[in-house]
Every structure is written in structure tokens, then in C-alpha cells.
Image (cartoon, grey):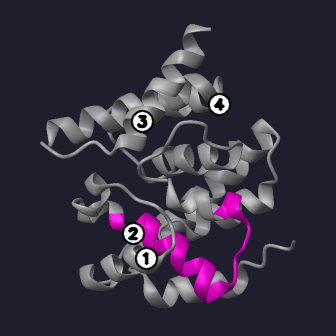
Amino acid sequence: MLYDVSDKKKYLKEKLSAKRYAHSVNVAAECRKLAQKYGEDPDKAYFAGLLHDICKELPDDEQKELVISSGFTYCREELETKSLWHAVAGAGFVKKEFGIEDIDILNAIRFHTVGRAGMSRLEEIVYLGDLISAERDYKDVDRMRKLAYSSLNEAMLEAFAFSIRSVVKKGGLVPICTAEGYNFYTRLQKK
């Protein structure tokens, strides 16, 4: 499959703010680099990274409707957390509107915010690419960037821990798949 991004970039440029578009391009570039490092298809990783936030700036009611009609499973905690809707909505949207059938790309978009146990290499790359993209500037981002390029499993464990700490600090709900993902990578590290 060829991953033609020119029309997708045009679509994103029209639908997203300049800041969100820049983020999407940065994530795509990071995903390409991570894919080269970890033996995944760089073009496929770029493509998935580019589209990961495609529904992020849609009105809440449209996002929620896309979540419900997406055909993807989601948990109660996700449905009760508006900031997570865009991932499920995005996976459903690119499947329906762009005819993307590659389940690995769809899952990479769907799980880029919450993660899960047993993620594919592409899913891991998009999850991390989103967390360490060029414009990110949170406190430990440089440490996270180094970790992402030294050990994928360690980076995933740290990313899950970071995500859970952030959610708990804000008084949010932790989706079941996020807790399962944390446990999965914790067990991998113990082996």
C-alpha cells in the first residue's frame, strides 16, 4: 500500500488550526524516525502519525457521535472523558471517509491517547511519537526522548506511568486499557 500524504496534508491544513497541524506534522516526522530505529515501515508510521489527531478540533457533539458510530470498542471512562474522544473518532473517521482498512493504522490512531496491553510496534511508535514530538516541552520531555530511542519497552512503561500520573493529578478517570497497558509493560520489564 502506498501512503499518499499530500491530499491528507491538504485536508488537515484546511480542518485543523495552524498549531494542531504543525503538531500533526511533527508527530509524523517523529514516527518516521522511530520506525526507522525499530524496524517498522517509515512511510506507514508517518501516515499514521500524521492522521492521529484528525478529529481533535471537531465540535464535541460531532466527536461523540463519531465515537459511538465508529465500530471501535471503548470503555465508560473514555466516553466520560471528552479529551479522549478524538482518538476513537479519528480511527472511525479515517476508516469511513478515507477508506483506510489497515487495522494497524486504525489501532495506532485509536489508541494513541490511552494505550493498551499488547500494542503493535506501530501503535507504540505513534503513542510515543505523540508524546515526544518536536514542539513538546513538558518537564521530562528530553529524558523521554532519550528513552524512546534507547529502549522501546522502557519508554512505553515510562509513558504509561507519566500518563496515569497526569490523569490522577487532574482528578480524571483512568481508562481500563491504560491500566492494563501499564501492567503489561511493567511485567515485560520484570522479565
**Label 4: how many residues lie within 10 Å, few (<14), some (14-19) or many (20+)?**
some
Q: Are marks 4 and 2 in contact (CB under 8 Å)?
A: no
Question: At label 1, which amino acid type do we have?
Answer: Cys
Q: Which residue is mark 2?
A: 86
Question: At label 2, which amino acid type do we have?
Answer: His
Closer mark to the observer between disc 3 and disc 1? 1
Tell me the distance, in whole angstroms, between the alpha carbons under discs 4 and 3: 13 Å
Question: At label 4, which amino acid type do we have?
Answer: Tyr
Instruction: Name the spot of residue 126 as percent of width and height, x first.
Output: 59, 51
- Dominant SS in magenta: helix
Q: Which residue is mark 3?
A: 141
Looking at this view, is 17 or 156 the one in front? 156
Q: Which residue is mark 1?
A: 55
Position of residue 25 in the picture relative to residue 43 (left or right) = left
Tell me the distance, in whole angstroms, between the alpha carbons under discs 3 and 1: 25 Å
- Name the residue at the left extreme: 171
**Label 2: how many residues lie within 10 Å, few (<14), some (14-19) or many (20+)?**
many
